[in-house]
Image: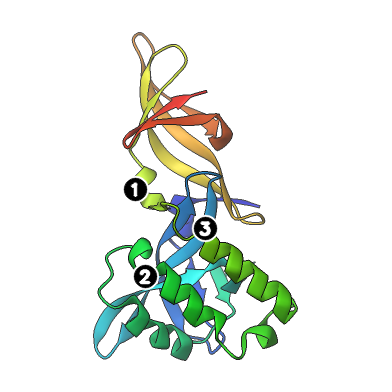
Amino acid sequence: MNVSLEEFKQFSLITLDGYEVSFKDFIYDPEDWELKYLVGEISYRLKKRIVYIPKLFWSNINWEKKQLLLLIGKTDLELSLPVIGNSKSIEECEIPLLAFYRKLTHLNSFTNKPVNSLLIDFDKNVSAAYQKKHKLHDLKRKNIITKNWTFGRIKDLILDSVRWKVSFSLVDYCENVSGKRKMVVPTSKLLRKSLNQFAIN
């Protein structure tokens, strides 16, 4: 099922022990548009702290309540905070963070995957950890050059909640005569030209 990024901002993230984590953003892989981490915010010692939650710990969506259920408890998220430390991006802490999650003793209890399969998943993530990743919200308002050389901006993003990938971008663009229009562009058609600009392939 598809959900827009704007709509997902209204969702809450619920841990195994019922704690509500505030949703802030997704981290995605620009190579294949796959969502890798949830960026959440928790209260810890009277402060708001950012946590990164790998996709392995995302469970079912309750569409009626607008909740994403997590396969992890609040205590585990708090234990990840020293690993994250003062990191300003996922790249600065990803390797030790994945090692932390890999060691969680209750990992197999909360998923349907065998332990060996889970460790393989984490090892794949570690091998990909050196690749540059981006925050999904940073994509919004990036420039788009259309085929007929009109210019537009990414207004919103459509997420596939089954494969957890960015499937489409909703683009506002201008035509000389008709004014502003909207179009939906599959992410497979977007070609990154620079940090702030995409072309439609």
- Residue type, label 3: Ala
Q: Nearer the viewer, residue 40 or 95?
A: 95
Q: Which residue is mark 2?
A: 93
Q: Name the residue at 39% across, 38% down.
A: 155
Q: Which residue is mark 1?
A: 138
Q: Is residue 132 above or below residue 90?
A: above
Q: Quadrant of residue 89?
A: bottom left
- Residue type, label 1: Asp
Q: Residues within 10 Å of mark 3 (few under 14, many from 20)?
A: few
The answer for how far apart the CA atoms under marks 2 and 3 are is 13 Å
The answer for how far apart the CA atoms under marks 3 and 1 are is 21 Å
- Residue type, label 2: Cys
Q: Nearer the viewer, residue 128 or 196?
A: 128
Q: Which residue is mark 3?
A: 128
Q: Position of residue 195 (x, y in %)?
A: 32, 37
**Does residue 60 appear in the picture of this structure?**
no
Q: Secondary structure at mark 2?
A: helix
